[in-house]
Image (cartoon, rainbow, N blue to C red):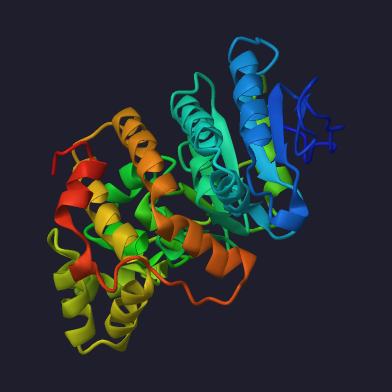
């Protein structure tokens, strides 16, 4: 059996009793997941991750579904992350358990995706950040495009790269993952492949061909092939910076890293040092410590670490302040609790990890 040249767009609908901010369909044995908040670049809410967790669990035992394919509604991207404004509002209202409850369900979803018993295919076109990485980069086949902007930008808002992101970034070549984790800067699709956050770079117009290929594989027939654009290190803007990145980001001391970056002759290194110096000092120090710990941890151990850190950050003023400055008042002038990374109390950092560093 050969694959169809393209698949007819199915009729999507919400799961019964769940939000219509995430929609589902089954066609050609492909369980389709579509994040459906295009005006918010499909940012994840508690209702959305609860719906996805229930649907993916159901499909795992459904013989009519042979694989899962996730994409995002609209033209801007798959997902800009978790709806941190909603989380902040819950914390300000004294509902800390509600806030960390969202993260707990989200991290359970991330772990399910990583362990999914069927192919889980992610279409990582456009913006894919934070929680968007969590619902895509833990999958078994991950497509990026020339439009992809992939990032874990949590230090910008006084948080840390959660959703198992520290597990992914700790396994990137050299210190590339450290650079991404501390700066929060976005990277291209080619960069994402080099980093290990994605597998294949394709044209943004090739989604239907990817789906047809997947349908053919599930039908046991010939796949059309020819979709993938091979990516080598030379295509990655980030790989070209490996020399100064590996040199400057070595070690466990955030202050030393910033000093090396600012003193380096490469202007890009100096810019990175300035950027990290503007991030939440608490976030930078804890992120670096968590990233180093993640090197020796499984994904599920990192997700458990995320749960523990989530409670710490929910109570720390920098998260509330960072979201305010970037997304609520949008003045981009956060007033962090610490003046610099050198001022972050090591005992406070140790306590965040249960007293172990």
Query: Which residue sits at x=61%, y=49%?
Result: 89
> Is 307 situated left or right of 134 in this image?
left
Question: Can you tell which quarter of the image residue 352 is in?
Answer: top left
Question: Can you tell which quarter of the image residue 219 is in?
Answer: top right
* Residue 34 image point, x, y percent: 72, 39
Q: Is residue 116 above or below residue 87?
A: above
Front residue (pair 97, 200): 97
> Is 196 situated left or right of 23 in this image?
left
Tell me if I can see residue 346 in this picture. Answer: yes
Q: Is residue 197 above or below residue 118?
A: below
* Residue 10 image point, x, y percent: 84, 33
Q: Quadrant of the N terminus?
A: top right
Query: Which residue sits at x=54%, y=27%?
Result: 119
Query: Which residue sits at x=21%, y=58%?
Result: 174
Q: Quadrant of the C terminus?
A: top left
Question: Can you tell which quarter of the image residue 156 is in?
Answer: bottom left
* Residue 88 image point, x, y percent: 56, 50
> Is 76 situated left or right of 191 in this image?
right
Tell me if I can see residue 264 in this picture. Answer: no
């Amino acid at each position: 059996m050969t694959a169809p040249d393209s698949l007819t767009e199915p009729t999507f609908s919400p799961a019964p009793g769940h939000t219509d901010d995430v929609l589902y369909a089954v066609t050609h044995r492909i369980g389709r997941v579509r994040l459906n908040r295009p005006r918010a670049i499909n940012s994840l809410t508690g209702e959305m991750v609860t719906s996805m967790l229930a649907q993916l669990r159901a499909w795992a035992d459904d013989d009519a579904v042979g694989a899962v394919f996730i994409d995002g509604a609209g033209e801007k991207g798959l997902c800009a992350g978790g709806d941190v404004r909603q989380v902040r509002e819950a914390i300000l209202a004294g509902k800390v358990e509600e806030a960390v409850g969202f993260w707990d369900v989200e991290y359970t979803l991330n772990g399910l995706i990583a362990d999914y018993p069927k192919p889980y295919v992610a279409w990582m076109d456009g913006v894919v950040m934070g929680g968007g990485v969590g619902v895509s980069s833990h999958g078994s086949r991950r497509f990026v495009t020339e439009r992809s902007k992939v990032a874990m930008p949590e230090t910008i808002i006084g948080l840390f790269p959660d959703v198992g992101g520290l597990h992914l970034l700790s396994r990137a070549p050299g210190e590339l993952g450290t650079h991404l984790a501390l700066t929060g800067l976005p990277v291209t699709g080619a960069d994402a492949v080099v980093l290990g956050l994605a597998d294949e770079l394709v044209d943004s117009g090739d989604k239907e061909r990817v789906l047809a290929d997947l349908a053919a594989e599930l039908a046991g027939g010939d796949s059309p092939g020819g979709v993938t654009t091979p990516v080598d290190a030379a295509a990655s803007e980030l790989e070209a910076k490996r020399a100064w990145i590996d040199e400057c980001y070595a070690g466990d001391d955030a202050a030393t890293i910033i000093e090396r970056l600012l003193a380096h002759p490469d202007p890009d290194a100096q810019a990175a040092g300035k950027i990290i110096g503007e991030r939440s000092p608490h976030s930078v120090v804890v992120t670096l410590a968590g990233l180093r710990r993640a090197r020796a941890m499984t994904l599920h151990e990192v997700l458990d670490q995320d749960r523990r850190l989530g409670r710490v950050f929910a109570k720390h003023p920098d998260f509330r302040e960072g979201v305010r400055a970037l997304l609520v008042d949008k003045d981009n002038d956060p007033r962090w609790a610490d003046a610099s990374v050198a001022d972050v109390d090591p005992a406070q950092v140790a306590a965040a990890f249960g007293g172990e560093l």
